[in-house]
Image (spheres, rainbow, N blue to C red):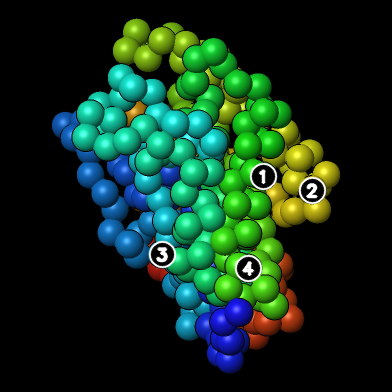
Amino acid sequence: MVDVPWARPLRLLAYGDSNTWGFVTDAGTGSPSRLPDAERWPGVMQAALGSAVQVLVDAIPGRRTDRDADADMPIVYSIAPSALNGLHSAEAVGLSQAPLDLVIVMLGTNDLAIVPPRSSQEVAQACVRVAHGLVRGARAFTPGRVPQVLLVCPPPLGGDGGIRPEMPGWPAIWQASRELAAALDRVARAEGLHAFDGGSATPISGPDRVHLDVDDHFRLGVALADRVRWLLPAHMALSRDVAPKGLNP
């Protein structure tokens, strides 16, 4: 086993998809881009928590929980479909980022578009499997430092759920995104894990109705920083007044 004599900073891992990676769409041109690190919710959370914490990020647009990407996804033309399988990578990521004190998993949105559809309960259970994979990896070298788990339900998809010709099945996917939080909370309680409803912190305001905009990232990052303070109170002597600037009122 590996000796890790340093206890600080606390190491937090944010494991997610495009809404952790920082994918945004320009409202005027529709062109995609990526937010700077400081403006993504993990960076906002880092700024709010301060130097006692190190926020690590592993995020990939299109990542699913425990399923490979579909062969017809454009990105799969240049990478293996398994690259977007969150469970496939989880143990290796846990190993590479160890030691960890908290694992934050925010996945599930991309699973809602899988055909045939997956139930919210099945997606929630898959999120738990991903979290367990990350923990197995993280504790392999440092069994005395086992991370807690926080499952974050992505905010529900934006808009009104009406038909979108460019996205078959959108109304059902939109509705399923509103059912995932309750399923994730049930599964987390059964597994003794922590859960947080991202939709309680922010809507999805991006023009594509799928991705967080910069203000959404800010709201989510501040809310999750508050949650982390609650989860790790014995390890954090942090002021609740510490918070990044930048939210447009």
Alpha carbon distance from label 2 to label 4:
18 Å
Tag 3: residue type?
Answer: Gly
Of the numbered discs 3 and 2, the one sitting upstream in the chain is 3
Residue lying at the far front of the rendered structure = 1
Residue 163 on image: x %, y %:
43, 9
Quick one: label 3, few (<14), some, or many (20+) residues within 10 Å?
many
Tag 1: residue type?
Answer: Val
Residue indicated by mark 2: 191
Residue 78 on image: x %, y %:
21, 35
Circle nearer the viewer, 3 or 4:
4
Instruction: Tell me, yes or no, whether the two marked residues, 2 and 1, touch with CB atoms within 8 Å.
Output: yes
Question: Tag count in the figure?
Answer: 4
Q: Secondary structure at mark 4?
A: helix
Instruction: Tell me, yes or no, whether the two marked residues, 3 and 1, touch with CB atoms within 8 Å.
Output: no
Residue lying at the far bottom of the rendered structure = 5
Circle nearer the viewer, 2 or 4:
4
Quick one: label 1, few (<14), some, or many (20+) residues within 10 Å?
many
Of the numbered discs 2 and 4, the one sitting upstream in the chain is 4
Of the numbered discs 3 and 4, the one sitting upstream in the chain is 3
- In the displayed structure, 166 sits above or below 124; it is above
Q: Secondary structure at mark 3?
A: helix
Q: Residue at x 67, y 28 (%)?
A: 122
- In the displayed structure, 164 sits above or below 237; it is above
Alpha carbon distance from label 3 to label 2:
28 Å
Of the numbered discs 3 and 1, the one sitting upstream in the chain is 3
Alpha carbon distance from label 2 to label 1:
8 Å
Residue indicated by mark 4: 139
Q: Secondary structure at mark 1?
A: helix
Give me the disc on residue 43. 3
Please tell me in which quadrant of the rendered image residue 199 appears.
top right
Q: Is residue 238 left or right of residue 43?
A: right
Residue indicated by mark 1: 128
